[in-house]
Amino acid sequence: MHENRTVQTKNGDSIILRPALVTEAEDLLNAFKEILPTSPYILSTVESAATKTVETQVKWITAANEDPRSALIIAEHQGRIVGITNMAAFKDSKRSHRAGLGMSVHHDYRGRGLGEALLRRLIEVAQTLEGLRFLELNVMSANKVAHRLYLKLGFKQIGYQELAYRQPDGTFTDDICMCLDLTARP
Ligand SMILES: CC(C)(COP(=O)(O)OP(=O)(O)OC[C@H]1O[C@@H](n2cnc3c(N)ncnc32)[C@H](O)[C@@H]1OP(=O)(O)O)[C@@H](O)C(=O)NCCC(=O)NCCS
């Protein structure tokens, strides 16, 4: 499993980036529920998160920590979970060199470099995983902040689908598919 790292945000907070513990399943669920109302561009919704249980979180954390082709990294500040990123490789052999990722930062901590630090750490961990070549993701075109972050860290746009997402208010958003070739990075 990956090691702990400490990073400084732009406003000087010291944040620990580390694996999540199964004993933190409830805290992780609560942190995610807190992040959701200010994250309209991720697939989970307040309603879908309400159906998640501590048991499902325990399974998720265990799978991420035990599977050598997955990783779950949390950002901790003063005992509080303020950011989450994860990746998981496809299980079938023909796509096992590709892993999908997700990430979110608590709204109080955005715009301070934490998202970038989390993603840089995830990429670093991905580069140590045997046989993994691509990190990939889907981002809603309206999610300018995330799109810019991914471009900044070297992800390339490899696909585009119009009207791929329908928001609760009935408006549609396009999908941008992005990919990072881990072998093309130093
Ligand atoms: C996307 C997200 C993880 C970014 O985290 P963050 O901590 O706010 O980002 P950072 O402060 O590290 O900024 C990194 C880069 O993102 C972009 N960015 C950050 N804030 C931005 C803003 N307000 N406007 C435009 N770009 C912005 C910039 O490229 C920035 O680099 P720069 O500082 O050199 O300009 C965060 O906004 C979030 O959790 N959003 C809700 C969940 C979500 O949408 N997740 C992604 C799903 S695909």
Image: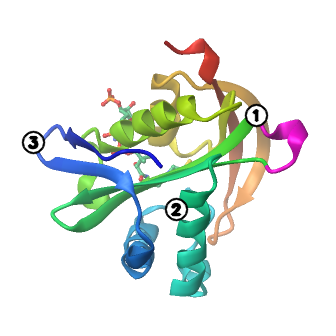
Residue 40 lies, with reference to residue 25, above or below; the image says above
Report whether the residue tagged 1 is closer than 8 Å to ligand 1.
no
| Left or right placement of residue 27 versus residue 137 in this view | left
Q: Residues within 10 Å of mark 3 (few under 14, many from 20)?
A: few
Q: Are marks 1 and 3 in contact (CB under 8 Å)?
A: no
- Amino acid type at image mark 3: Gly
Measured in 3D between alpha carbons, the distance from the residue under mark 2 to the one under mark 3, in whole angstroms, is 28 Å
The secondary element bearing badge 2 is classed as loop
- For the point 49% across and 37% down, the residue is 125
Between circles 1 and 2, the one closer to the viewer is 1
- For the point 45% across and 74% down, the residue is 22
- For the point 77% across and 47% down, the residue is 90
Between circles 1 and 3, the one closer to the viewer is 1
The secondary element bearing badge 1 is classed as loop
Residue 108 locus on image (x, y percent) = 24, 59
Report whether the residue tagged 2 is closer than 8 Å to ligand 1.
yes
Residue 104 locus on image (x, y percent) = 44, 55
Between circles 2 and 3, the one closer to the viewer is 3
- Amino acid type at image mark 1: His
Measured in 3D between alpha carbons, the distance from the residue under mark 1 to the one under mark 3, in whole angstroms, is 37 Å
In the picture, the disc for residue 12 is 3
Marks 1 and 2, the one that precedes in the sequence:
2
Q: Which residues are magenta?
A: 91-97
- On the image, which quarter does residue 28 sit in? bottom left
What scheme was used to colour the molecule?
A: rainbow
In the picture, the disc for residue 40 is 2
Residue 62 locus on image (x, y percent) = 56, 68
